[in-house]
Image: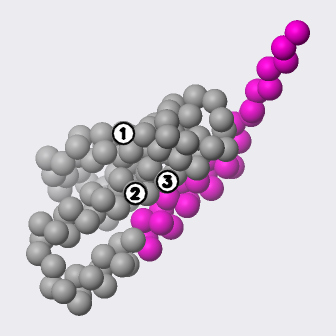
Amino acid sequence: MEQTIKKKVDLLFLLKMLAFSYILTTILLLLLSILLYKFRLSETVINAGIIIIYIVSTFFTGFLTGKKIGTKKYFWGLILGALYFIVLTLISLFLNHGISDFTGNFLTTFFICVGSGMLGGMLS
């Protein structure tokens, strides 16, 4: 007779992982700003850097979450990528005082965050 061990998904753990993703994002953005200051990077390079930061932050969050939870790793990576995007959207809405300043990159950013989180979970 096999016993299945179900790991309870801890809401506090998910919030810690989301906080970790934003701490990592902050550190990487600071590094990008230093590079901008030192090397006078173009807008194209800065935009690419921001996308890479989204990918790295959500990938590592999904990866670590998948390692911890152990089942449905891709799903939990996807959830954390979506939560990352939701918080990012709420911050943007708050700072821009509405949705009128949203760019056409809204869906692209969503798929980048969700896809990177899911990939991190799958590879964990």
Label placed on residue 79: none
Q: Dot 2 lies on which element?
A: helix
Instruction: Give the Cα separation between the discs numbered 1 and 3.
Output: 12 Å
Residue tagged by mark 2?
56
* Image-based side of 47 in relation to 71, left or right: left
* Image-based side of 110 in relation to 124, left or right: left
Q: Dot 3 lies on which element?
A: helix
Residue tagged by mark 3?
60
Compared with residue 117, is residue 91 higher up or lower down, i.e. above or below?
below
- Give the residue type that dot 3 points to: Phe
At horizontal 36% and vertical 39% (from top left) the residue drawn is: 115
Compared with residue 88, is residue 36 higher up or lower down, i.e. above or below?
below
Q: Are marks 2 and 3 in contact (CB under 8 Å)?
A: yes
Compared with residue 10, is residue 47 higher up or lower down, i.e. above or below?
below
Q: Are marks 1 and 2 in contact (CB under 8 Å)?
A: no
Residue tagged by mark 1?
115
Label 1 or label 2, whichever comes before in sequence order = 2
Q: Residues within 10 Å of mark 1 (few under 14, many from 20)?
A: many
In the image shown, does 84 or 45 lie closer to the viewer?
Answer: 45
Q: How crowded is mark 3: few (under 14 residues within 10 Å), some or many (20 or more)?
A: many
Q: Is residue 80 visible?
A: no
Q: Over which residues does the magenta segment extend? A: 1-27
Q: Position of residue 76 (x, y in %)?
A: 54, 36
Q: Quadrant of residue 65?
A: top right
Q: In which quarter of the image is residue 31?
A: bottom left
In the image shown, does 64 or 80 lie closer to the viewer?
Answer: 64
Q: Position of residue 73 (x, y in %)?
A: 56, 34
Q: Quadrant of residue 96?
A: bottom left
